[in-house]
Image (cartoon, rainbow, N blue to C red):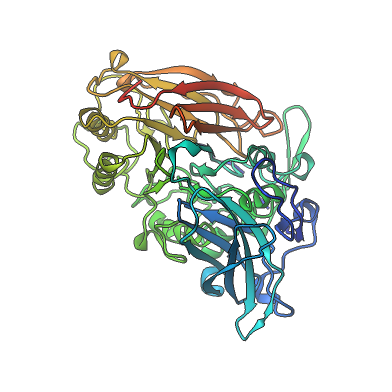
Amino acid sequence: MSTNPPGSSSTASPSVVPSAPARRSLLRGSLAVSAGLALGGAGLTAPAFALSGRPKAAWGVQTGDVTARSGLVWVRSDRPARMIVETSSTESFRKVRRHHGPLLGAGTDFTGTTALRGLPSGEQVHYRVVLADPEDPRRTGEPVLGTFRTAPERRRDGVRFLWSGDIAGQGWGINPDIGGFRAYESMRRLDPDFFLCSGDTIYADGPLQAAVTLPDGRVWRNVVTEEKAKVAETLAEYRGNFRYNLLDHNVRAFNAQVPTVVQWDDHEVRNNWYPGQILDDARYTEKSVDVLAARASRAFTEYFPVSTFPAGSSAAEGRMHRVVRYGPLLDVFVLDMRSYRNANSPGRQADDTTGILGAEQLRWLKRELAQSRAVWKVLAADMPLGLVVPDGATDFEAVAQGDPGAPLGRELQIAELLRFIKHRQITGTLWLTADVHYTSAQHYAPERAAFKDFAPFWEFVSGPLAAGGFPANKLDGTFGPDRVFVRAPERSNLSPMETPQYFGEVDIDGGSGELTVRLRADDDTVLFTKVLRPGLVGQ
């Protein structure tokens, strides 16, 4: 997103989340930090000063990259501790299986992830995370509870998930007056199988102010922390940005109930960044984006459970792009359109093998798409394809560059991918993204396009989840997009008090195989619905 916000300090303490609906069991115990304390005052003590008593996990728990037989569980301690995860098929934990996790210490900011394997498919799994004193394993903290549902191995069970992105952006952070990040509670009540977070999970380049006066005279109040008082440059500051979102009770309750498939985009590091960039920005003392990205990616891997990143590693030791297989109905292809791209430019190159994915990731994606046997293949993109996203006066940030003619620049790589999908007759592809801070549906068709060697497909956009709203971007005609639906504000950077926040829902029916997309607002309103039929190369 080509926007830059405004500076920031506060904290939290544990409580019980509301019960979950439908098939989710009631979550009891200290799942999270209460809204009142998180939004106002008393606080989570930094690990360096919390040396008495038993280990605590007041930042909640979360799960990631859950499949039919496996998943990852994350936690953060307030001091050195051994992580232990106990799983059960019942909420009473009558029969428990124990999974031994890592030793949590300062090297990973007291965070850790434990892999769970050999899980039952298509079942509700209840888990509790226990933190033990490394010197005395009998001294344990209060268990922190969570639950998730593994992917089905039978097609008839169906799959339902949500997606969105863009969290705490453009100066709009956790506001106690509106109940914090309310969209998370709306999503939690829908009880999805998982959540696809499409990037901009933090705004490391977006300091917060304690109060912002809106055009109508109302005042937006932010919870602020030391790390949110300036742009993030150090590893500690990036860690603090990821920790900030966990101050919100809605986020913690959601994390304890719904697994996440997470990817990143630009604001995890800095607005519109690309590898090799040298900053001309007075707010930064560190000018090398590569240095900043290494620190940010390490913090990212510490604060999210991602199967392709070893905990505490950096981008050089792992990779963001991966396939998360969710049973016979669905494969999610998580793309990284940030780490391998070339420099932002006017995008008029007639030959561009690097593009936005890099040559190696493109080869990987083709191979995985060709091998996929899932009915539906979701291409989880952190940026849109045919929406023109500028970077300054002459450069462009995403794929499209405003020229509706034959593919040029980064469009060449996307044209190659779309041609491959058509010629290999790969069925059931659709693109999901966030990034532009509104919600829309685009249908791409060769009869409207300058480049015609591809099968029709849909791209759905939804966001932000907790950030500023922006007007709709212009379309680029190279791949023939038709904007079938859009809901966007007319002014830039409207606060969540002035415009809805958005997320999308994908519901795959186990019987018919039909896939239904619903674009939703945070007040539970369904704004747009599209039903897609399985087994087609394009539709």
Q: Which residue is painted at 69% across and 30% down in the image?
A: 523
**Which quadrant holds the C terminus?**
top left
**Residue 185 image position (x, y, % from top left):** 68, 41
**Residue 127 image position (x, y, % from top left):** 61, 60
**Residue 343 image position (x, y, % from top left):** 32, 43
Residue located farthest toward the top when viewing the structure as drawn: 447
Residue located farthest toward the bottom when viewing the structure as drawn: 135
Look at the image and tell me whether residue 403 can be seen: no
Q: Quadrant of residue 14?
A: bottom right
Tag count: 0
Relative to 515, 149 lies left or right: right
**Residue 38 image position (x, y, % from top left):** 75, 55
Look at the image and tell me whether residue 186 can be seen: yes
Q: Which residue is painted at 67% across and 66% down in the image?
A: 57
Viewer-side residue, 28 vs 481: 28
Viewer-side residue, 327 vs 9: 327
Q: Which residue is painted at 54% across and 32% down in the image?
A: 504
Relative to 30, 305 lies left or right: left
Location of residue 484 with respect to 65 vertically, above or below = above
Viewer-side residue, 469 vs 492: 469
Q: Which residue is painted at 72% across and 44% down in the image?
A: 180
